[in-house]
Image: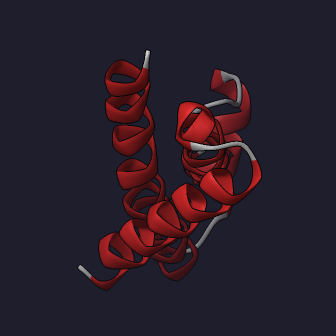
Amino acid sequence: MKYFLFGIGLSLIGILISIILWGINKAYLVTGIIGFVFIGISMVMSGSIASGDRMRANFATESAEDRKERIRVTSNSLLIGLPSVLTAVLLYYLTT
């Protein structure tokens, strides 16, 4: 839950930065970039971008502790990025 709240805080900071720089009309840009960066980190850490043989090799060589850490980082970065993406979509449809 604290990572989701951290994501909401990043989203609000992104809105404030974009209002200062460009105004409310471009507020979806900064929040969208923040959100997609963290969702990209989540995709890379989950291994979903790798090919099948690479995923199989990684799964065979990692320990249970490493797998647990990878899944934790994946879910936490997704929880950080999700509020920013949702805010960006909402701002896009409200301001255009």
- Residue 63, percent across and down? 57, 74
**Numbered circles on residues, count:** 0
The answer to whether residue 47 shows anywhere in this view is: yes
Looking at the image, residue 89 lies above or below residue 3: above
> At 44% across and 55% down in the image, what residue appears?
78
> Which residue: 39% across, 34% down?
91
Residue drawn at the location 61% of the way across and 53% of the way down: 19
- Residue projecting furthest to the left: 1
Query: Which quarter of the figure has residue 27?
Result: top right
Q: Position of residue 32 (x, y in %)?
A: 57, 39
Toward which corner of the image does residue 66 lie, by quadrant? bottom right
- Compared across the picture, whether 92 is left or right of 23 comes to left
Quadrant for the N terminus in the image: bottom left
- Residue 45 appears in the rendering: no
Colour pattern of the rendering: secondary structure
Query: In the depicted view, which residue is nearer to us: 78 or 16?
Result: 16
The relative height of residue 10 versus residue 52 in the rendered view (above or below) is: below
In this image, 70 relative to 17: left or right? Answer: left
**Quarter the C terminus occupies:** top left
Q: Would residue 34 appear left or right of 87 to someone viewing this image?
A: right
Q: Residue at x 65, y 46 (%)?
A: 30
Q: Position of residue 46 (x, y in %)?
A: 55, 49
**Image position of 55 (left or right of 78):** right
Comparing 60 with 18, the one in front is 18
Residue 22 lies, in percent from the top left, at 72, 43
- Vertical order, 2 against 51 (above or below): below
